[in-house]
Image: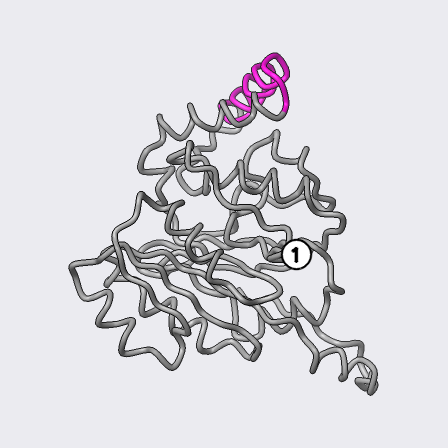
């Protein structure tokens, strides 16, 4: 399944549009790794194949003891910045990467995540116009890189910080944010800091752009699916913090009932 945005038939790219394209903003793509030898090379290759030129790739590694560092060093033509040192966990490493980023925009990919197609970033930035937050749809792949289907929770056409009262309505990897407003992760959360980050990002944003096509092939099985009980507890704390205790309780009951009635499970969804 491949979805492309195509120009109107017969339309020529005008000089003004070409000038805007040539002045595309720089993007910092960030990956945090630890013993990711099985998946990291595919992610590097996907980034290298992107037609979008003005990008840097930052990898913060937690002192891997497998072949992860060897693979990263073999791909220094794609890996712009590489740090390998002990950290205090996933979100601590992500904060280090944010501090290292130099792009006007930044985004995160896990080892194993891929861009949907080679033109994905070019099409995204050609369609968007300097908005604070760009976001898109997400396809799900398994650990064999086979397509499972589209993410069950689909992004809303209009996004705001209030949208996340229904959960992680946009996959974390399908969010591209202006670095100037991107917050650091709250290290008091060990599993659900991503949704807290997304809420604070959207509270700071003044403009949004919805790229109505898949941007990312997301590999299921992240930290929150591995630590689901803790993730649900932390997410409830995040929701209560921003939306209030009683509204969060009723909203969670409503969402739980919806899942039961639809007989859908959340194992394919990034929490």
Q: Is 96 on the left-hand or right-hand side of 10?
A: left
Q: How is the image coloured?
A: one colour
- Residue 54, compared with residue 227, is above or below; it is below
Rendered image quadrant of residue 233:
top left
Q: Indicate yes or no whether the magenta region holds residue 69.
A: no
- Kindly identify which residue carries mark 1: 134
Q: Residue 190 location in percent, x, y?
A: 37, 35
Main secondary structure type of the part rendered in magenta: helix
Closer to the camera, 84 or 207? 84
Q: Indicate yes or no whether the magenta region holds residue 244.
A: yes
Q: Residue 45 location in percent, x, y?
A: 39, 74
Rendered image quadrant of residue 265:
top left
Q: Residue 152 location in percent, x, y?
A: 53, 42
Q: Which residue is found at the position 70% from the left and 55% from the top?
A: 132
Question: Which region of the structure is painted magenta?
Answer: 243-260
Q: Residue 183 location in percent, x, y?
A: 56, 46
Closer to the camera, 94 or 255? 94
- Residue 259, compared with residue 116, is above or below; it is above
Residue sitting at the far front: 99
Q: Is 147 on the left-hand or right-hand side of 176?
A: left
Closer to the camera, 232 or 64? 64
- Residue 66, compared with residue 23, is above or below; it is above
Q: Which residue is found at the position 61% from the left and 55% from the top?
A: 177
């Amino acid at each position: 399944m491949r979805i492309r945005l195509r120009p109107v038939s017969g339309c020529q790219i005008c000089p003004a549009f070409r000038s805007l394209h040539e002045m595309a903003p720089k993007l910092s793509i960030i990956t945090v790794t630890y013993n990711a030898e099985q998946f990291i090379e595919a992610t590097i290759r996907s980034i290298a194949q992107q037609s979008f030129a003005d990008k840097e790739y930052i990898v913060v590694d937690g002192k891997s003891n497998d072949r992860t560092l060897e693979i990263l060093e073999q791909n220094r033509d794609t890996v712009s910045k590489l740090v390998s040192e002990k950290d205090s966990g996933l979100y601590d490493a992500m904060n280090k990467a944010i501090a290292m980023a130099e792009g006007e925009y930044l985004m995160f990919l896990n080892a194993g995540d891929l861009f949907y197609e080679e033109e994905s970033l070019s099409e995204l930035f050609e369609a968007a116009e300097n908005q604070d937050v760009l976001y898109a749809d997400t396809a799900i792949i398994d650990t064999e890189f086979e397509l499972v289907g589209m993410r069950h929770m689909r992004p809303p056409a209009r996004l705001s910080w209030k949208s996340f009262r229904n959960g992680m309505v946009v996959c974390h990897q399908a969010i591209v944010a202006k670095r100037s407003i991107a917050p650091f992760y709250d290290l008091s959360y060990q599993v659900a800091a991503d949704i807290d980050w997304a809420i604070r990002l959207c509270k700071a944003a003044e403009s949004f752009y919805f790229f109505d096509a898949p941007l990312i092939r997301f590999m299921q099985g992240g930290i929150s699916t591995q630590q689901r009980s803790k993730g649900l507890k932390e997410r409830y704390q995040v929701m209560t913090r921003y939306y209030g205790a009683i509204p969060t309780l009723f909203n969670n009951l409503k969402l739980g009932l919806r899942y039961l009635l639809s007989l859908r499970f959340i194992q394919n969804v990034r929490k």
